Image (spheres, rainbow, N blue to C red):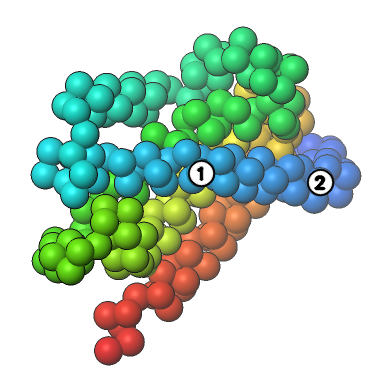
Amino acid sequence: MNDYIATYYNPDKLEKAWKVIQADFLRETGVTLYITLMATLFAVIIGLPLGVLLVTGDQKGIRPLPKPLMAFLNWLINLLRSAPFIILIVVLMPITRSIVGKAVGNAAVIVPLVIAAFPFVARLVEGSLREVNPNIVEMSQSMGASAWETVVHVMLPESVPSLITSLTTAVTTILGYTAMSGAVGGGGLGNLAITQGQQRYNQAVLLAALIVLVIIVQIFQTFGTWVARKSDKRLKQ
């Protein structure tokens, strides 16, 4: 243990790490937050309606869709969810280049992040909507509400606490993906940890990046849990 500390946490390494922290950490933390929030936004834009479709289009849903279509959607979501993100980034490079004009960089990494995250978001939304009391849905339909009105005015409002919890989970998962994207040129704390920490054998930079990422996750998680509790009507009764 003493040899490990002497090798990786000696005064010279710590001094270099402190210079990196002072010069780059604030900027790269901002890049990480930007990439995470933008990827989450687009993943929700795609994943939320897809999750609704998985529930409403089911054979027992309020507006069943053809079985082949539902089977294809479920297959596609499962396929994208099962692909390791680090491999997905490389495979999607041609698509990323065609969309943003380059395959690496802060804007480029958002494309594979969205493609990796929207199936995850769709499954989370699906799970949240399936928790809604079916009696409430049936009551809405019996009163003449259309499928659209049932979704907008009944299913989504009733599942708000669960959706917020799911969104929090999605944000923290995407945040973890952003750190991994540093391995292929994505910006942020992950890239800083690899280029200034791992490649230069400076464990102090790696440790500092890890601590900042953990703090960010805890902030997102705490805020999401607080908002979910505030929006839960059952806790107000």
Residue 30, image x, y percentages: 75, 48
Residue on which the image places disc 2: 27
Residue at x-position 18% and y-position 69% = 143
Secondary structure under the numbered disc 2 in the rendered image:
helix
Quarter of the rendering containing residue 121: top left
Q: Nearer the viewer, residue 55 or 7?
A: 55
> Does the image show residue 57?
yes
Residue 11, image x, y percentages: 81, 43
Residue at x-position 67% and y-position 20% = 99
User: How many residues crowd around disc 2 within 10 Å: few (fewer than 14), some, or many (20 or more)?
Assistant: few
Residue 97, image x, y percentages: 68, 15
Whole-angstrom CA distance, mark 1 to mark 2, is: 27 Å
Residues at discs 1 and 2 in contact (Cβ within 8 Å): no
Residue 74, image x, y percentages: 26, 28
Residue on which the image places disc 1: 45
Q: Relative to residue 168, is residue 44 depicted above or below?
A: above
